Image (spheres, rainbow, N blue to C red):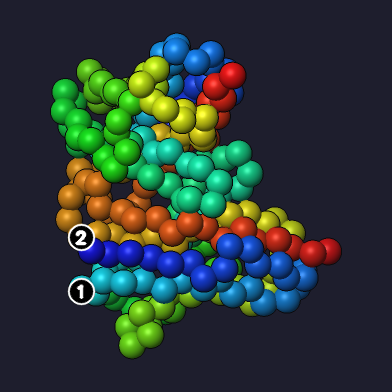
């Protein structure tokens, strides 16, 4: 089955540690995205990538980093510089680089900082 | 700049009764609009989209939405609620061009009473 796989589903981190969230898609989509979701705030865009080896900052990129070495993979690193990293993180993809709004989402990774 | 406002953070209905989730948008032109659904601890799934064709849009699971330009609204409805409809619903507006071009509403939590 085609889809987006995020791992791990739950992750705990101590303050000061970096952590990397995995996102893999087998939909052959060009564009991939990372969103952060906090209760009552909807989704906010962290980073997006339209093509391999290229990515752009979204609205809340500070304290995060990404890479896009393969079309299928778009990992997100939450660095120690991110002041409030506890959140639900969602990875998504779309067929075309220009966003038509038809995003396909993974099931999310919930990060808790202890 | 485009924006979207979901007028209710929570809506509670009885099973078998109609559902109405309200969304207003702000845009300098006629945008594309979407509704997504998110079940607990899951990713989002596209319910339906409006892209300047028919103003009444039918989606999955019996949901539909009507684009009303004069009222700048895109309310989501369903004639008869099922227990499985309990979820978070997001109204989304496309900014217009560019891969980062979506603005999410803050969500409406739909509760279905037995």
Instruction: Tell me residue A8's x, y (percent).
Output: 53, 20
Q: Is residue A13 above or below residue B19?
A: above
Return the x and y of residue A77 as percentages of the image width and height. Answer: 36, 20
Q: What residue lies at 23% left-to-right and 63% top-to-bottom?
A: B1
Identify residue for label 2: B96
Mark sitting earlier along the chain (1/2): 1
Q: Is residue A52 above or below residue B64?
A: above
Question: Quick check: B41 left or right of B71?
Answer: right
User: On the image, which quarter does residue B29 sit in?
Assistant: bottom left
The answer to whether dots 1 and 2 both sit on one chain is yes
On residue A108, which mark appears? none
For disc 1, the neighbor class at 10 Å (few under 14, some 14 to 19, many from 20) is few
**At which x and y percent is residue A105?**
44, 40
* Residue A66 occupies quadrant: top left
In this rendering, does residue B73 appear at all?
yes
The residue singled out by tag 1 in the image is: B29
Letter of the chain that mark 2 sits on in the rendering: B
Residue farthest toward the right in the current orientation of the protein: B114
Residue A92 is drawn in which quadrant? top left
Between B96 and A27, the one lying in front of the other is: B96
Q: Is residue B83 left or right of residue A38?
A: right
Q: Secondary structure at mark 1?
A: loop
Tell me the quadrant of the picture where the C terminus of chain A can be found: top right
């Amino acid at each position: 089955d085609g889809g987006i796989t995020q791992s791990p589903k739950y992750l705990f981190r101590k303050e000061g540690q970096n952590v990397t969230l995995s996102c893999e898609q087998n939909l052959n989509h060009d564009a991939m995205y990372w969103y952060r979701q906090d209760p009552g705030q909807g989704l906010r865009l962290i980073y997006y990538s339209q093509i391999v080896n290229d990515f752009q900052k979204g609205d809340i990129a500070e304290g995060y980093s990404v890479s896009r070495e393969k079309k299928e993979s778009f990992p997100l690193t939450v660095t120690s510089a991110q002041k409030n990293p506890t959140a639900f993180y969602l990875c998504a993809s779309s067929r075309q680089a220009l966003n038509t709004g038809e995003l396909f989402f993974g099931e999310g990774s919930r990060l808790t900082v202890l | 700049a485009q924006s979207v406002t979901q007028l209710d953070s929570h809506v509670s209905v009885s099973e078998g009764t109609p559902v109405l989730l309200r969304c207003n948008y702000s845009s300098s032109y006629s945008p594309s609009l979407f509704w997504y659904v998110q079940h607990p601890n899951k990713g989002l799934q596209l319910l339906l989209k409006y892209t300047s064709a028919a103003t009444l849009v039918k989606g999955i699971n019996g949901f539909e939405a009507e684009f009303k330009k004069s009222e700048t609204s895109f309310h989501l409805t369903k004639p008869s609620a099922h227990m499985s409809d309990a979820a978070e619903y997001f109204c989304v507006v496309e900014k217009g061009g560019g891969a980062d071009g979506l603005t999410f509403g803050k969500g409406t939590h739909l509760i279905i009473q037995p």
